[in-house]
């Protein structure tokens, strides 16, 4: 059996930052990091617009309190304010630390780190590296992993969390190269497995964002928090869904409907295009519904609106958001210097996830903790984003809470022994599962069932929701779950068989989808990204609380947990 003091699943910003912190504070610890992609291909690498921190380089009036207020207001008052305070207070320090590691941030003429405007933020505080911020940060972190001697298992797929007697003891994983299955035991297990964008048919997320960590935790008996809160990013490039960063609007781009109007004036007259994402996504959806969307020939009544950069000029477009220009040019042949881009909302980010305290330790219930289990980044819910995340707060969360969780783990494992695990029974079960998949003789292709699931989630649990829609969605999803045993694999080989992974990911997507729909159905109010046409108001009396959803094959059980309100009393949310 493989054995490491700490095993971290996930090589994005959160996992890498945690691994580094552990090795920096306790260099003698044996730390391993597993990722089903190469760490540098984690979705973090695709982050574009930047990372918020009150460095005050552009806006001396800014403060951590203002950042905290914007975050809490953006969250529609569902964020835990003790966690937001930590996030915003520690932000400047983690950015400076990244800079010292060698991250190449964009600069002001005087050499200090540049900062730009972002949606829902009252000051210009987003630090960036052009529109390739995630790329710049992740490369430095991965370089540092090697320097600090972290053991890396890249292109290994973790298929099970070993959780016994309320303690995480390790994971079961296999090498994608040859399907060699291994049990790893550890004194602490950390999940940093990212989001689940692939549960929707249009998403900005990469192919690996399939919610594996969430599903593995749920199946092991850990509750998942606030799964109803799914962020739809306003500007997915139509029809592909690829992200056009909010940085483009931060730099001054307009949203225009078929009549040529800057329609955000009707929805958020003060913040306009820089309103938070939930509000902007609803505005675009309503414009399209009202027949003011655009068709490919430019006529009214179509499925998208325009993102117009033309007034910004070539120099600004090419120096500040070159990657977004390139995406539109490469994918649609559009030259954004002269033509507007077609955009509409796209599935983007998971506000909910594995519930953790501010040290990253996973909660087993409203007031209990799981021994030896930690999580950070997009798969975790600490909760700093509540019902709606502000742009550029996620990279920040990954680094602040990655660092904190790493520090907590380094202390936690010091006096702990390796747990006992019945290795053979886990190996047999995992090998049996893989063999079953290879031998399954069904009639359905993986892609066919996955597409049906993604269509179901997008149609019945999208930007706007109702009881009727979501009930129908849940019915359809349950029927799709019945189809899983009828899926067959074309590839029967054990060498580099990516179909095995797709089959396991599909199962995970089903679990995540059911948790999203069930949590959403039971929240009878509109708050942040969860917008119900049958309950259009926020209802603080009944729903100012976090959902905890417990998964079992018999059904999902819900409990609710209070919100931590330490700084700002809930108010009406206007922009
Ligand atoms: C296009 C795009 C642009 C964005 N831009 C910004 C931005 O400008 N600012 C901002 O703040 N946020 C942005 N975000 C959000 C932000 O990038 C993510 O929330 C964040 O990077 C997530 O990091 P992470 O470390 O939690 O996970 P990820 O970077 O998603 O990494 C997950 C890791 O887990 C591994 N993994 C998952 N499942 C398994 C398994 N079963 N076995 C083994 N390994 C597994 C993967 O291989 C990967 O290494 C953007 C997101 C997208 C999609």
Image (cartoon, grey):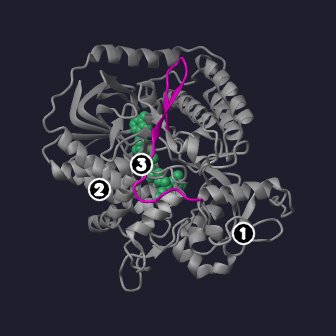
Residues under numbered marks 2 and 3 in contact, where contact means CB atoms less than 8 Å apart? no
* Label 1: few (<14), some (14–19) or many (≥20) C-alpha neighbours in 10 Å: many
Task: Assess whether residue 565 is covered by the magenta stretch.
Answer: yes
**Is residue 236 among what the camera can see?**
no
Instruction: Assign the magenta stretch its main secondary structure.
Output: loop
State which mark lies toward you, 1 or 2.
Answer: 1
Q: Give, as a single range, the part of the protein colored magenta.
A: 547-572
Q: Is residue 470 above or below residue 64?
A: above
> What element does badge 2 sit on?
helix
Instruction: Give coordinates of residue 293: x percent, y percent.
Output: 80, 59
Residue 433 disc label: none
Q: Residue at x 66, y 56 (%)?
A: 281
The Cα–Cα distance between marks 1 and 2, rounded to whole angstroms, is 38 Å
Left or right: where 238 falls relative to 153: right
- Disc nearer the start of the sequence (2/3): 2
Residue under numbered circle 2: 143
Residue under numbered circle 3: 564
**Is residue 280 among what the camera can see?**
yes
> What element does badge 3 sit on?
loop
Residue under numbered circle 1: 340
Left or right: where 338 falls relative to 93: right
Q: Is residue 326 above or below residue 479?
A: below
Q: Residue 140 or 515: which is nearer the viewer? A: 515
* Label 3: few (<14), some (14–19) or many (≥20) C-alpha neighbours in 10 Å: some
Instruction: Give coordinates of residue 565: x percent, y percent.
Output: 43, 52
Q: Residue at x 62, y 64 (%)?
A: 574
* Residue farthest to the front, as pictured: 541
Residues under numbered marks 1 and 2 in contact, where contact means CB atoms less than 8 Å apart? no
Label total for image: 3
Instruction: Give coordinates of residue 236: x percent, y percent.
Output: 64, 56
> What element does badge 1 sit on?
loop
- The image quarter in which residue 423 lies: top left
């Amino acid at each position: 059996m493989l054995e490491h003091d700490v095993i971290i699943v996930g090589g994005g910003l959160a996992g890498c930052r945690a691994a580094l912190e552990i090795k920096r504070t306790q260099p003698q610890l044996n730390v391993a990091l597993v990722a089903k992609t190469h760490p540098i291909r984690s979705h973090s690498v695709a982050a574009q617009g930047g990372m918020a921190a009150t460095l005050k380089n552009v806006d001396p009036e800014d403060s951590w309190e203002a950042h905290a207020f914007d975050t809490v207001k953006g969250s529609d008052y569902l964020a835990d304010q003790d966690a937001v305070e930590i996030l915003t207070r520690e932000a400047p320090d983690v950015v400076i630390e990244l800079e010292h590691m060698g991250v190449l941030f964009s600069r002001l003429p005087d050499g200090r780190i540049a900062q730009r405007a972002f949606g829902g933020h009252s000051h210009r505080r987003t630090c960036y590296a052009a529109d390739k911020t995630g790329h710049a940060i992740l490369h430095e972190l991965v370089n540092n992993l090697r320097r600090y001697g972290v053991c890396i298992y890249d292109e290994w797929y973790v298929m099970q969390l070993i959780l016994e007697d309320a303690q995480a003891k390790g994971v079961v994983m296999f090498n994608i190269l040859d399907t060699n299955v291994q049990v790893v035991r550890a004194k602490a297990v950390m999940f940093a497995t990212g989001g689940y964008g692939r549960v929707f048919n249009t998403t900005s997320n990469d192919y690996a964002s399939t919610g594996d960590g969430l599903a593995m935790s749920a199946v092991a008996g850990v509750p998942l928090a606030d799964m109803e809160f799914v962020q739809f990013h306003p500007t997915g490039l139509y029809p592909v869904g690829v992200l056009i960063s909010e940085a483009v609007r931060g730099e001054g781009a307009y949203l225009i409907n078929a009549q040529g109007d800057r329609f955000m004036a009707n929805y958020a007259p003060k913040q306009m295009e820089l309103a938070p994402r939930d509000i902007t996504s609803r505005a675009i959806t309503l414009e399209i519904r009202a027949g003011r969307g655009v068709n490919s020939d430019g006529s009214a009544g179509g499925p998208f609106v325009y993102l117009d950069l033309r007034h910004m000029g070539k120099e600004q477009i090419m120096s500040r958001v070159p990657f977004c220009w390139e995406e539109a040019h490469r994918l649609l042949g559009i030259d954004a210097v002269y033509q507007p881009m077609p955009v509409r909302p796209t599935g983007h980010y998971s506000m909910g996830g594995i519930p953790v305290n501010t040290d990253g330790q996973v909660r087993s219930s409203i007031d209990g903790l799981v021994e030896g289990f930690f999580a950070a980044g997009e798969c975790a819910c600490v909760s700093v984003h509540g019902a709606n995340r502000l742009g550029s707060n996620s990279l920040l969360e990954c680094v602040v809470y990655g660092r904190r969780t790493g520090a907590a783990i380094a202390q936690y494992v010091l006096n702990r022994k390796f747990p006992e695990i019945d290795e053979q029974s886990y190996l047999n079960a995992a090998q049996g599962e893989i063999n079953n998949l290879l031998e399954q003789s069904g009639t359905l292709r993986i892609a066919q069932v996955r597409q049906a699931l993604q269509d179901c989630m997008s149609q019945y649990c999208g930007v706007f929701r109702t009881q009727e829609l979501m009930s129908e969605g849940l019915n359809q999803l349950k029927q799709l779950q019945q189809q899983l045993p009828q899926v067959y694999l074309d590839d029967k080989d054990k060498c580099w068989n990516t179909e095995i992974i797709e089959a396991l990911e599909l199962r995970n997507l089903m679990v995540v989808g059911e948790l999203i729909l069930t949590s959403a159905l039971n929240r009878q109010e509109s708050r942040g990204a969860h917008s119900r046409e049958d309950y259009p108001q926020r209802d603080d009396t009944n729903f100012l609380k976090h959902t905890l959803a417990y998964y079992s094959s018999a059904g999902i059980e819900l409990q609710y947990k209070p919100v931590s309100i330490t700084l700002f009393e809930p108010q009406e949310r206007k922009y």
